[in-house]
Amino acid sequence: MKKEQDKPMLSGPMEEFPWPEKLTARVVSPGPRPRIHGYDVEGDLALHYSFAETVLLTLTGEPPDPVRGKAFEIALIFLSPITIAEAPTHAAAIARLAGSRASGVLATGAIGLSEQASFILETHREFLETPDKTALHFPERFRARSDEEREIVKRLKNALPVGFQFPGSEEDPAPIPALLGVIHACGIKKPEEMQVVLVLARLASLFAEASTTRPGRINDYPMNLPSFRYSEGGNDE
Amino acid sequence: MSDRPVLETTLAHAEWNDHILRRHRIFKDLLGHCDFWNLLSIAMNGPGIDEAGLAVIHRICVSVTAADPRLPPMKIVRLASCYGGTMAAIGAGLVYQEDASIGTWTAGRAAQFLMDIAAEIGDQEMTPSSVERSMRALISKGAKLAGCGVPARKEDERAQALRHAMVEIGQVGGDFWMLMNIADGVFRKVARSPINISGVVAALFLDLGFNPRQIAVLGMVISQAAFIANALEGAEQAPEVLRKIPDEWIAYQGPAPRPSPRAVPRPSG
């Protein structure tokens, strides 16, 4: 590696503005013994906390109690399946079909998951902004729309630790509002942090599903699902 | 099984031996008759671009090229290319940009802001005072200034160079060009910030007939020389120092070391 003093001196705003000299770390400490929010990863968290609890700690800054930790893990498991019918996995599968490297499949899927998570949170903004007050006003569109959805929420409640309460639980919520309520009750309040949870939960099943697609077998791909019907509309000038 | 879902498109259709793009046959109608920028504009449902318009766009493309690898979008490209990949690096440099305040998408926001000022002025004469009134009215309604300000220096040299280039070729008569010139003075008064490259690019593309959404995406296209060059050199170098900055160059400002509640021995008895 060349040293800076070996180079001829050039002048410009990058050289002459008083930029800071170091990158700032605020969550993960650098060095051979990493800490997250001050907690020793290898000598403490690995011995006493599950991966789900470590994720929760990382996002909230504080170690969860066992009840919250378990509830968060249940939420991650309920969120984890993402079928090939959903856009992120579908896109990742096409990347695989096109012969992409694993990193390209993963990156394509991760972008899709991130956009999906952003969309879910945007469409639940009203619920997320005041989840603790939703018992007073729980919008109709967040309620379960079928017995199938009610069964999912029933299975969620059965899986959660005894006594764990989450906002909207008594309002006949649909599965996604119920899961967002669980995540909120675990201490993750900010939508952008919930976005991380949604992406993290689904990345493995997305990749596993996409990886089963055989590269190059374009004739095996249902090109007309959905079909696009071309018409000569628009404002071509 | 339910009916197969169908989506409507007016964009394109793959035919036997040709491809349709917005009513044009690629090989029969466009090949040999259409330059890249008109092809792009047809694809985007944008305006036709004449020779004078092409001269404007070519000067825009050159003026916006700030490829220094330390600049934020380029640094992202460098960081994503440091393991040897090229396309993901370009993707990383682009994917963050939607609605971001630094990057090529800002030209779209600047275009929307100029359009909002123009709408606020309405039938009034376009003067520094009417532009300032309109700008302040928009700000009071929650709008954010767009198209002004530049870090680490007093003027945006790219904006100045592009404005000078437009004067040289006589492209100074557009409505948004004139609005942008007045807005520059108001920006300096209201925000102590000069017009930046996004503001100038926005005005020029608006005068060519593009809308703000199209301009936001065009910002990506016109910057590709810098993105591609950084991805190529970055992947070629794949430098160790970017893969991990040495620890001594990281300042840790997080919580001090502490034991977790489960690691702390409980008091006996």
Image (cartoon, rainbow, N blue to C red):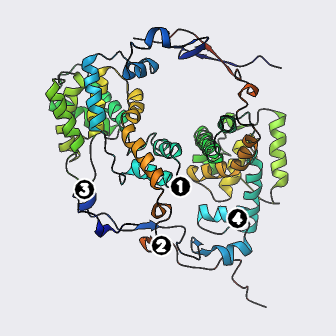
The disc numbered 2 marks a residue on which chain? B
Mark 1 near mark 2, Cβ–Cβ under 8 Å?
A: no
Q: Which residue is mark 4?
A: A53
Few, some or many C-alpha atoms within 10 Å of disc 4 (few <14, some 14-19, many ≥20)? many
Kindly identify which chain the residue marked by label 3 belongs to. A
- Residue B83's label in the rendered image is 1
Instruction: Specify whether B43 is left or right of A39.
Output: left
Distance from disc 2 to disc 3, alpha carbons, whole Å, reads 26 Å
Labels 1, 2: front one: 1
The three-letter code of the residue at mark 4 reads Glu
| Placement of A195 over or under B252, stated as above or below | above
Q: Residues within 10 Å of mark 3 (few under 14, many from 20)?
A: few
Q: Which residue is mark 2?
A: B247
The kind of residue on which mark 3 rests is Pro
Residue B1: x percent and y percent? 83, 20
According to the picture, the residue beneath numbered tag 3 turns out to be A13
State how far apart marks 4 and 3 are (Cα). Answer: 45 Å
The mark closer to the camera, 4 or 1, is 1
Q: Position of residue A230 (x, y in %)?
A: 59, 12
Q: Amino acid at mark 1?
A: Tyr
